[in-house]
Each structure stands twice: as structure tokens, then as C-alpha cells.
Amino acid sequence: MSRRTNWCTAGLAAAIALAAGAAVAQEKELVFGLHCDRTGATQTVGVFLCPGYHDYIALLNSKGGVEGYKIRVLEIDNEYKVPPSMEAHERFKKEGAVLEGLYGTPQTAALTKKLEEDKVLGTSPGFGTAAATDGKRYPYIFPIAASYWSQGAAAVAFAKKQLGGDLKGKKIAYLFYDNPAGKEPLVILEDLAKSEGFELRTFAVPAPGVEMAAQVLDITGRFKPDFVITHLFGRSPSVSIKELKGKGYPLSKVISFVWGASEADIKAAGGYEVANGYHTLQFAGVGGDFQVIKDINAMYQAQGKAPPKEQETSVFYNRGVMVAAIHAEAARNAIKAKGGAKPTGEDLKKGMESVKGFTLGGMVPPMEIVEADHEGGGWVQVWTVKDGKLVKDGEWFQAYRDVIRKHLAATN
Amino acid sequence: MLHRETGVFKTSYAADMALYPLPIARWTVAGIVILFAVILPLSLHEYYLSIINLSLIAIVGALGLNILVGYTGQISVGHAAFMSVGAYTAANLAVKLGLPFWITLPAGGLMAALIGAVVGMPSLRIKGLYLAIATLAGQLIIEWIINHTPAISGGAQASIEVPRPEFMGHHLKTQGQLYYFLLFFAVLATVATLNLVRSRIGRAFVAIRDQDIAAEIIGINIYRYKLLAFAISSFYAGVCGVLYTYYLGIANYEQFQIGVSIDYLAMIIIGGLGSVLGSILGAVFVTMLPIVLRLIMEPLAGLFFSSAEMSSVISSTRLVLFGALIIFFLVIEPEGLNRLWRNIRNYFRVWPFSY
């Protein structure tokens, strides 16, 4: 490695090594790689989610790490582009990462094969394909959160509950972003429309998704559905709230998938007043009322700093905390299983496949990750806009698992 | 590339057109071949090879776009879509028919060439910004068709997983193996372009770029050559898409959206329009600069910020620096890196004398 081309990098590396001191290098350390988007198309999510991840790991490290191992997080901004995430993976691998937090659906797709070949575990909460739930087919990809299929099923189950327990003869509109992620839940919705006996009509919003007056007019003026399920990204969820509200459709009959569900979307739509009644699906708890968030704030306070301002968008911040916590839990299982020895990517895979009953004080669903189910059960919670904040509407639930399982089997 | 002669001594057309104007040029090329074929892959860590691999893929695409934009004077904002055409053609052939890469790769290129020629048809009537909009439409239409045709895209996720390329019974999957795979095609594309632009076809392209009416008057079939430029350029784009597909192991149209088309235009503008070396320099510059900037900033930022703050600082600073450097290089030499390199060479041609 001491070739001329590397001298520059080596010199810089030496500089940090000196600054950090030799003692650090001696410590037991695990390396996690974090793909993030702080400057690209989906930076509205990344700038909140990634600090949550870092804060939880810092909290763990301040308490002595995981089973005596300090965790070092390397973050690379992929700008929601594929080549940088490919480069990031090779970089993480070079630094000895055993686990990577992926970011973005195309990026997850691009890295799926490489992660399997290199035996590095990758998690894709809210990204990637629903088929990745099947750990036999995708051994090194872990969605660790409800896939779009599970979210679709949960949305229908919630609509059923709101409409009095029977969907026969009812009408449900599905308003979605016209990309692969937006279309993915369609198979589940169509299947459920048949078995539950409701009429499903779909309304695609083309990219960039900020213009949907025509679709919303079609929904409210012509189709007049009993319930609306929305699956939008970026700026479009706020537009959908505004449009539906503007056309006089009651937001209490609208439920959004997980990427249209943050405080930022509600604020962009005109505030909590406007969005009152809007339902959102969540795969991590919302708000600051969790012990782990209080611990993070205490850690900041002990350093004489204010709590991070990213917590204002707690939906995404908490997801970052949740992902970090599950990563750490998998590492804990892996280290324990090896009797304290340093785990490899394969060990972490086994560690991840034994995550069970880890709820982080209610912030994480009671998931059980096994080889046949890398989603951990597809749990979601509904949070509703009420009196100026997001309020929990019921406990963690999963829906129509048999239907999901049937479709998973069919894709293989 | 590196040589400098002391004057112009050419007495025949053959000498003027020669790929190696001086014996030293031959040695330079031989040296570069040894460097890239032997020294680099054996001495560099896989990580650095992976960065070079990304650049090699970009070089193929940039060369193709430069044939169209730099040599023929047409514009295309739809090149990423042609890449996806190549990618899906190859992926479908590789998965449904189980064909090896040496069939799927040219097939992907040919399909992209066909579609490219169709999308290029407006170029027969319109130029400049109008043509840019027409090709932009091509980009969006192709994206829409792939997204809504399961027979092409392979289902709702629009992703097709492709087996690794197989060469003499070996699956190429490590960065080192893929390096040779990609290097072969990048070199092939470079040599092909070098020869194309000094052939009759290349000269016709340049004539069309400089003044299409004059070109028509001296007997160049504008209709034929404009479409040919689109076809050849799209062929490169298609091959670039296929290489990318094999490199990643998956075809997914979301990797070839409008932003990628713009990136490739940026590469050839920064590198230098109408120049093979410029395409290579531009592709390398745009691919590697953000990575190099981060590698330089990481240890520096580590001295001032905590690790959590660092990531946020680095990603924003990097974007600013990347933009600033592009502006800087274009201001000191509007004709791109290629011209900058030529200026340096010309300066040293008579060095240490001033004339």
C-alpha cells in the first residue's frame, strides 16, 4: 500500500493518527458505515435522520459501547446518486465495516449483489424492494421496518377500522408517486380489494410530484372515495394535504405512507391547523417522550450543549435513532454469540436474525427478525395530527400477514 | 500525449494523420498501457480500483456524448435514457435468454443506437435549444415507457438482477476483475473514437458542426450523418449502460434519470468539446473530484469538528468546492481541461525560450 499514489492519503491519515493518539487504536472497535443524503434529492429526510443515528451511537459509546466495543460510524453523503454509494461501500469495506445503513431505493438495489458477495450486512428501512423481506433470497439485505407491501396492508386495515369494520362496497383511492416505489404496494392493494370487496382506484402523480390538482379533483369530485391512501415523497405529501383540504375532503379519511408523515410535511402544508385529522403510518415512535431521547438530551446537557435542533422533526430523527439502535442490538447479539470476539459480517447477519423483543421503551415495534422475515413482522403505528401535534392512534400492529406471505412466495 | 516536437516537419498527409506523430508517442502509449494494465491493478487497494472503475464507465459514456455534442454539434439531454435502453436490453437478454456479455453488450449498444437515431430525428429540422428540448422529451418518454412496461422493466420495482459477466469460466466480481473488464471496453471505446474522428465519417461530423449548409453543399448527406451521429453516440451510451449494469449486477432505470444526462454534459464541457482526451479528463474529473475532495477534507475537518458534525460540514463544503472548482477551471480555460493541457504542452514546447 505504500505506493506513490497513496502517499498523499497516507500522509493525511498519519496526521490524524498522531492527533488522535496511539491509545485509541488499541481500543476494541466496530466500524459501521452510514450512507446518507444531506445534499441531494431527498435531503429533507437525510438532514434529520442521520444526526439521530450519530446521536444514538454517541450515547452508546459514552456508556462504554456495545459489550466493550466502541462503535465508529463512517458517514458518506451519496447525494441520492448511485455511483457515490458504490464508492461509499468500497470505502466502508476498506475501513473494515461489518454493517452498512443503506439510503435510497436505487442505491439499495445497486448494492444488493455487492453486499452479498462481500458479506457485509445492509439495512434498508423504508427503502428497497418488499421482496427483500425474504432472507433466503436476499441474505444480506434487512429492511428492518415495514415494507411498502406491509404498509399497504396496514393502511387498508386502518381504513377498515375507521369505516366501521367492513369494507364491502366501499371506495378507496390510492394516490401515489409514479415511480417503482410508488407502484410497489399496488399488488397488495389490488389483492385486498378483491378479498375485502372494496373498489380501488389509483391516481398516479408524475415526477416531481408537486402538481396534483387534476388527480385530487378527480378523487374528490368524481370518485368520491370513502378513504384515501397516499404514498408520496419529498415535497409532494405537503401538496397533497393542501390540495385535499382545499377541495374540501376530510383529512380524517386520509392515511399516508411513511415518507409523507413528518412534522416538516405538515408544516409545509400550512401547519397543524390545516392538517388536523391527517393520519400517518410510522415505523418508529414519534416525539420526544421516550427515555432514549431524554438520555441523548442529557448527554448533550452534560457537554454543556443544547439538545440537537434536528429533534424538531422527530419523525425522521427518531427513525435514525431506531436504525442505530437495531444495528447496535444486532452487534450485541453477534458479540455475545461469539463470546466477546470481534464479529464479522456473517456473525452480524446471525445477530440481526436474532433481534427479538427489543423495543427501546416503545419507540421500536416489537419486531422479531428471522431468516424468513428480514422485515421483522412489518409493524406500524398510526399517528394522527390533533391539537397541534402528532398523537398516537393505537398501538403497534401488523396486518394481512398471510396475504404478504403469499405474495412473497409468489415472487420467488 | 506527453511528447513535444520542436517544429512542424510533416511532409505528407499520412504523417499528419498518424496516431503516433513521433516515436516517443509510441513509447508514451506503451508506458501508459503498462501503467494501467499491470502497475495500477497490482499496486492499488480495491477501494481505489473501484473509483477507477466508476471513471472507466463514465469515460465510455462521455466519449459517446462528445461524438454527438463536441464533434457533430448536435445536443442531447437524453443520454441517460439511452444508457437505460442499453441496460434493460442487455439485462433482459442475459436473464431471459441466458446470453453471455459478449452478445448482450453489443446488443444493448445496437438497441440504444436504434432508439437514439429515432430520438435524434428532430435534429434534422431543429438545432440548439430546440433540439435540447426534443431530446429531453425523449429522455422522459423512455423513462415513462420503461416504468410502465413490465415486459421491459421486469415488474413493479423496474429492477432486473443480472448475473456477473463470465469470462473463460470465471465470474468477474471482484473490483480487480471488473477493472480489467471495464478497462478493456474503455480502451476499445477510446481507440474507436480516435479512429472514427479522423475517418471520412468523423470529418463529415466536424463539417456539419462547423456549418451544416456548407457541409451539404460540399456533398455531405446531412440526413444520413446527423442520424449516424446520434446512432453512434447512443451506441456508446448503450454500452455504457450495459457496463454499468454488469458492474452493479442490476438494471434499474432510476439510475439513469435526467440528472445523469446533465452530469455527462458537464463532463464533456469541463473536459473539452470535440476532444477524446477531453472526454477522458472530464469523466475522471467529475467522477473523482468529489471523492478526492472528501478524502482531503476528512482528516482536516476531524481536527475542528466532532465526528457527527463533521459529516454535515463535509457534505455541504464539498458541494461548494466542487462547484467553485468547475467555475475556476472553466474561467481559466473556457475550452476545458483538454485545452488547458495543450496550453501547458505548448508552453513547454519551446521552453526555456519564449519563442
Image: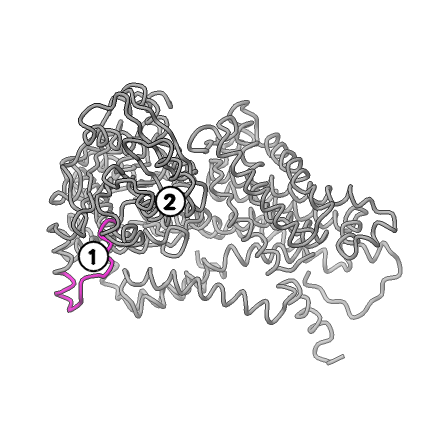
Magenta extent: A299-316
Residue at the image point whose x is 23% and y is 61% from the top: A309
Residue that carries the numbered disc 1 in the rendered image: A58
Question: Label 2, on which residue?
Answer: A104
Q: Quadrant of residue B16?
A: bottom right
Q: Secondary structure at mark 2?
A: loop
Quarter containing the N terminus of chain A:
bottom left
Tell me if residue A403 comes above or below residue B198 in the rendering: above
Q: Nearer the viewer, residue B85 or B148?
A: B148
Q: Main secondary structure of the magenta part?
A: helix
Which type of secondary structure does the marked residue at label 1 adopt?
Answer: helix
Quadrant where the C terminus of chain A lies? top left
**Which class describes the residues within 10 Å of circle 2: few (<14), some (14-19), or many (20+)?**
many
Q: Chain of mark 2?
A: A
- Residue A49 position, x and y percent, is 28, 52
Instruction: Give me the chain letter of mark 1.
Output: A
- State the CA–CA distance, disc 1 to disc 2: 24 Å
Drawn side of residue A4 relative to residue A227, left or right: right
Position of residue B222 in the picture relative to residue A283 (left or right): right
Residue B313 visible in the shown view: yes
Residue B223 lies left or right of residue B345; in this view the side is right
